[in-house]
Amino acid sequence: MTNEIYAGTFIWGRNSKRGLEPIRVEDAFPPIVTKEIFERVQDQLRERAPIKIHPKRVASRFLLSGLARCGHCGKALVGMDAKNGKFSYYVCGTLLKKGSGSCPARYLNSGKFEGLVIDKIKEHILTEENLTNLVKLVNEEIDSSCKAYREELDARSDEITDINHRLERLYDVIEMGELGLGDLAPRIKELRSRQEKLQVRKVEIESYLSDRKVELARPEIVKAYVKDLRKLLSNSPLSERKAFVRSFIKEVKVTGDEVVLTYTIPLSSRGIPREKVGGVLSTVHYGGRYWT
């Protein structure tokens, strides 16, 4: 995920003992992924790095660790257990550290809270419409990234046609006896060698363009994909679910009974949407505190 060679860039001398700058050659190879996708991955890796996300959050068993925030004071909501692990909650960092009265936030039942977020992801993000549009977007991005290859393919085809015409003229000269084969053999050999190289490159480009095209899935296949993604969100191991949620959920802010989800849908042209969910967090009394 960090090797630029997969984006078509060759780098040599990265660990030079003389302290020299490494040599970079852009577009040295046909890329497996576009530079845009490669940079997106680097951004996500940087965002998930321990220097930005505390290792405790990475290892936490709470699904929304590092994403949930208190709408009153802005502090992170911290996952915690009670009664020897029988109950678990999210609590405002200020309230947890400074005690009662420091923040009006309440304790949130982790199961209900996480279930609410998962339900909203299924309802607004993992939909058949979104997945269908995403496939269309992938096609558009592929078409854009393949433009240079199509231009090269046209240029190589034109050059092959030109070489064919040149060879035909040379053969005509030999048949008419104007020049002998010995005189023209070096030039014919040179043109044939160039012709073979162009043909090989043409086949490579055609194969690349063919492999890169993604066909829009049929409605029944899209439905199956959506079902699989929703199942992954509900039933996969915690580490997979956390990575999945973190890939598009930017923040979950809780203020009283209101939960605001801030998320990014890659295919959306309207920026980062926010979804408000009000009046859905029930409150129960337990041990002198209100657990929500």
Image (cartoon, grey):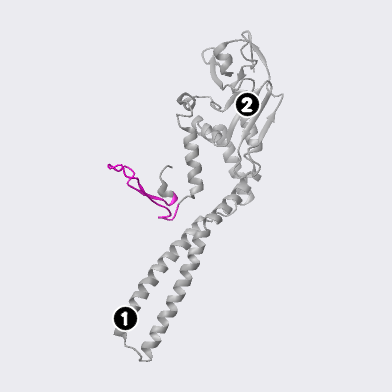
The foreground one among 28 and 252 is: 28
Query: Which part of the image, by quadrant, shows the C terminus?
Result: top right
Q: Quadrant of residue 109?
A: top right
Query: What is the number of the mark on residue 185?
Result: 1
Q: Amino acid at mark 2?
A: Lys
Q: Is residue 9 magenta?
A: yes
Horizontal and vertical percent position of residue 216? 60, 53
Left or right of 1 in this view: 132: right
Q: Is residue 55 magenta?
A: no
Q: Residue at x 35, y 79 (%)?
A: 188
Cα gap from disc 2 to disc 1, whole angstroms: 78 Å
Circle 2: element type: strand
Q: Considering only vertical position in the picture, is 198 above or below 184?
A: above
Q: Is residue 88 visible?
A: no
Q: Residue at x 47, y 37 (%)?
A: 45
* The residue stretch that appears in magenta: 7-31
The foreground one among 115 and 165 is: 165
Quickly name the residue at label 2.
Answer: 253
Horizontal and vertical percent position of residue 243? 51, 34
